Each structure stands twice: as C-alpha cells, then as structure tokens.
Image (cartoon, rainbow, N blue to C red):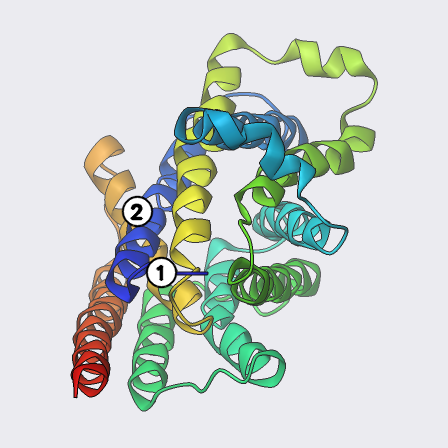
C-alpha cells in the first residue's frame, strides 16, 4: 500500500529533473568516444547506481526485491531502456530544438494514456501548467527548428511514447509493489541493445579514461539519481504530472552550460525557460496545497 504523501512525490520528481538536467553539460565534455559507446557505459553505470542504492537502503530485502519481479515488471525495464536509446538517437539525428520540442509533449501523452488505462482525471490546473510548459518550450527553441529531420523527430516521438508508458506502468504497478528493482535492470537491457553497435568488443576498450569518467557520471549523477527519484516520486503523483514536473530538466539544462562553460543561451531560451520553470512551480505548489486540503477534509470526515 502506498502511504507516500503527494508533496514528497513532487519533491522527488523535481529533484529528479534537476539531476537529469546535467546531461547537456556532461555531454559537452565528451572528447572522442562514439555515442553508442557512451550510451553503453552510461547504461551499465545507471544499473550499478540503482543497485547500489537498493543495497544501501534495504540490504535485508535486496535479493527478495528481485525475486519478486514478475514478467510484466520487465516491461517497465524495457520501456525505460528503449527510452534511453531513442532519446540519444534523436539528439544525433535532428537538432536539440526538435528533440526538446517533441519531448515537451510528454505530459500530454502520459496524461491521456493514464486517463485511458488508469482512469486518472487530468485536473484543470495540470492542463494549464502543461500548456504553459509547452508554450515555454516553443519560445526556447524558436529560431532553431529544422523541420527536415524526420528520422530524429520520429525517434523523439518514440522516446515520448516509451517514457509515457513507463510512467503509467509505474503508477499502475507501483501502487501494488516496489518498482525500483525493475528500474535497476533497465540499464543492463539498454547495454545489451547497444552491444551490436559497438562490436567488436575491442572498441569498448578504446575509450579514453576521460570519456569513460563522463559516461559514468552520465549513468550515475544524471540518469541514475534522476530516475531513482522519479521512480520513487511516481508512487504518489498522477501520471500526467510526472513528466510535467520533470520538465524542470528543460529549463535548467542551458543554465548549467552557461554557468560552467560560459555558453551564453539565447534570449528566447532564457524567456522560455522561465515560463517552463513557472509552469513546474505552479503545478508543484498548487498541487501540494490541493493535496493537503483534500487530506484535511478527509481526516475531518473520518473524525466526525
């Protein structure tokens, strides 16, 4: 049974977005390694990070959590693994602007899917925040859209659908049992999916220590901590709100690059990022207040 407060889930997902937002900065430091080799090591490090988290947080039940995995739970692992790969392939087949714009439709895709599958209603507040966020992303990428990159856009939509299904499955299955163990397996599955693209095995040994360190940081700091928090937060946050709150990644990504390597973002990027940030804060703040009000009314009714 899920006893996690809504406000805790919101905090987890927002923090998850912060960690995910470091990806653009870390990728800037890759020197020579191919995207597939980076993705291979990032995927392995992701799984090792989540496994370490599970071991440290619940040593006594570590093996039991994996023994309890059912076949349907592995669909969560596959969806996350496929999303990892589709996202990266989108970035290498179209502009970042196209990828970001398509990914901003994630909250709508997850919300509609959750409504059909789970019967979760989408609040008016969430619709307003989603439209604000989408408008903000449109402002961020205005002037950088290239409509000719169909393959990359298709990969981006595949990533959106994959992550939407991942979130909805987390909501459906997570209410009944722990889903952190299936999430941990996603990196191993993604690495296996990448393996044919990095053969012969000698190619994996050609990566420099510098690029290997970057790949490990991507797997642990970025997607490792990011999805540990998102998986935990999704237990008490409606599916439409999970990718919406996670859009904080979009608003923060250009700021890290600006602060760290002085890559000054365009004015539209900053304006749009502020709009996205406001949408995330609106959903988080008002959502928490509504949840507390509802809990207060429920407790009063029980005591009456």
Between the C-alphas of marks 2 and 1, the distance is 25 Å
Q: Nearer the viewer, residue 55 or 144?
A: 55
Q: In the figure, residue 68 lies in which quadrant?
A: top right
Q: Nearer the viewer, residue 289 or 191?
A: 289
Mark 1 Cα-neighbour bin, 10 Å: few <14, some 14–19, many ≥20: few
Check disc 1 and report the residue beneath it. 3
x and y percentages locating residue 55 in the rendered image: 48, 25
Helix, strand or loop at label 2? It is helix
Q: In the figure, residue 181 lies in which quadrant?
A: top right
Task: Please give the name of the residue rendered at 28% of the width and 85% of the height, measured from the top-left corner.
Answer: 125
Location of the C terminus by quadrant is bottom left
Helix, strand or loop at label 1? It is loop
Circles 2 and 1, Cβ within 8 Å, touching? The answer is no
Task: Please give the name of the residue rendered at 43% of the width and 64% of the height, measured from the top-left corner.
Answer: 243
Q: In the figure, residue 5 lies in which quadrant?
A: bottom left
x and y percentages locating residue 76 in the rendered image: 65, 53
Task: Please give the name of the residue rendered at 66% of the width and 62% of the height, measured from the top-left corner.
Answer: 158
x and y percentages locating residue 204 in the rendered image: 70, 16
- Whether residue 143 is visible here, answered yes or no, is no
x and y percentages locating residue 84 in the rendered image: 60, 46
Mark 2 Cα-neighbour bin, 10 Å: few <14, some 14–19, many ≥20: many
Q: How many labels, in total? A: 2
Decide: is 281 above or below 28: below
Task: Please give the name of the residue rendered at 46% of the width and 51% of the height, measured from the top-left corner.
Answer: 231
Check disc 2 and report the residue beneath it. 18
Front of the two marks 2 and 1? 1
Tell whether 245 sits left or right of 70.
left
User: Along the polypeptide, which appears first: circle 2 or circle 1?
Assistant: 1
Decide: is 1 above or below 59: below
Q: Pick out the residue farthest to the front.
A: 304
């Amino acid at each position: 049974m899920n006893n996690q407060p809504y406000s805790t889930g919101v905090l987890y997902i927002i923090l998850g977005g912060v960690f995910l937002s470091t990806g653009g900065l870390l990728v800037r430091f890759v020197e020579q390694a191919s995207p597939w080799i980076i993705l291979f090591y990032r995927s392995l490090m992701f799984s090792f990070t989540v496994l370490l988290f599970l071991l440290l947080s619940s040593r006594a039940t570590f093996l039991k959590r994996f023994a309890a995995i059912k076949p349907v739970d592995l669909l969560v692992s596959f969806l996350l693994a496929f999303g990892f790969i589709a996202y990266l392939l989108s970035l290498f087949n179209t502009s970042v602007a196209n990828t970001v714009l398509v990914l901003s439709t994630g909250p709508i895709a997850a919300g509609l899917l959750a409504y059909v599958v789970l019967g979760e209603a989408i609040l008016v507040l969430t619709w307003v925040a989603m439209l604000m966020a989408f408008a903000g992303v449109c402002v961020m990428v205005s002037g950088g859209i290239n409509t000719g990159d169909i393959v990359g856009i298709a990969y981006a939509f595949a990533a959106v659908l994959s992550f939407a299904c991942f979130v909805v499955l987390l909501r459906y299955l997570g209410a009944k049992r722990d889903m952190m163990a299936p999430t941990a397996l996603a990196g191993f599955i993604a690495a296996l999916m990448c393996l044919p693209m990095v053969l012969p095995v000698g190619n994996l040994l050609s990566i420099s220590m510098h690029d290997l360190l970057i790949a490990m940081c991507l797997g642990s700091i970025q997607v490792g901590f990011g999805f540990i928090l998102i998986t935990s937060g999704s237990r008490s946050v409606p599916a439409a709100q999970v990718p919406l709150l996670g859009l904080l990644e979009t608003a923060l990504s250009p700021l890290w690059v600006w602060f760290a390597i002085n890559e000054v973002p365009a004015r539209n990027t900053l304006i749009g990022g502020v709009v996205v940030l406001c949408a995330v804060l609106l959903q988080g703040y008002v959502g928490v207040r509504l949840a507390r009000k509802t809990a207060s009314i429920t407790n009063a009714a029980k005591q009456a």
